[in-house]
Amino acid sequence: MLEIQQAGPMNFIRTLLIIALVYYTLKFLARLFAPFLMKKAVQKMQERAEKQYGGAKKNNDVKVGETIIDKKPNQSKESDKSVGEYIDFEEID
């Protein structure tokens, strides 16, 4: 038949020891495998970013200190006349 164990100080201490053993085992395994798992996660994120942005090409022929402009900025700067009129004021002491 099924035997029910009584709650006693020895069973309580044994339960605490089992919980502590499981906790420290998981903590040890996490320290052991965390660098490997983090490296894999970073590689996977890097692959996704390269895939999303089309694998940006690296220019190896660029000299140190050289400035390269990939795209000419838009030069059309139009004044917005609907802003209102400018009022010049002076501070009075």
Image (cartoon, rainbow, N blue to C red):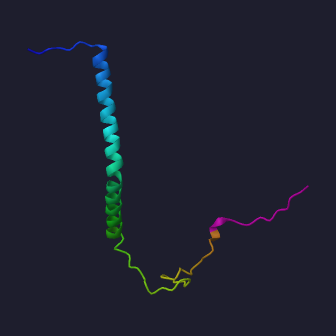
Q: Position of residue 7 (x, y in %)?
A: 27, 13
Q: Position of residue 57 (x, y in %)?
A: 38, 79
Foreground: 24 or 58?
A: 24
Foreground: 10 or 88?
A: 10
Q: Position of residue 80 (x, y in %)?
A: 62, 71
- What secondary structure is the magenta-colored segment mainly? loop
Residue 61 in magenta stretch = no
Please determine whether, in this image, residue 62 is positioned above or below residue 35.
below
- Magenta stretch: give its range: 82-93
Among all residues in the image, which is located at the extreme right? Answer: 93
Q: Which residue is found at the position 31% from the left and 27% from the top? A: 17
Q: Position of residue 2 (x, y in %)?
A: 11, 15
Using residue 25 as the reference point, say whether residue 73 is left or right of it. right
Among all residues in the image, which is located at the extreme front? Answer: 10
Using residue 63 as the reference point, say whether residue 2 is left or right of it. left
Among all residues in the image, which is located at the extreme left? Answer: 1
Q: Which residue is found at the position 30% from the left and 35% from the top? A: 22
Q: Which residue is found at the position 34% from the left and 70% from the top? A: 50
Foreground: 79 or 30?
A: 30
Using residue 77 as the reference point, say whether residue 12 is left or right of it. left
Please determine whether, in this image, residue 6 is positioned above or below residue 91.
above
Q: Quadrant of the N terminus?
A: top left
Question: Would you identify the image quadrant in which residue 48 lies?
Answer: bottom left
Q: Which residue is found at the position 33% from the left and 35% from the top? A: 23
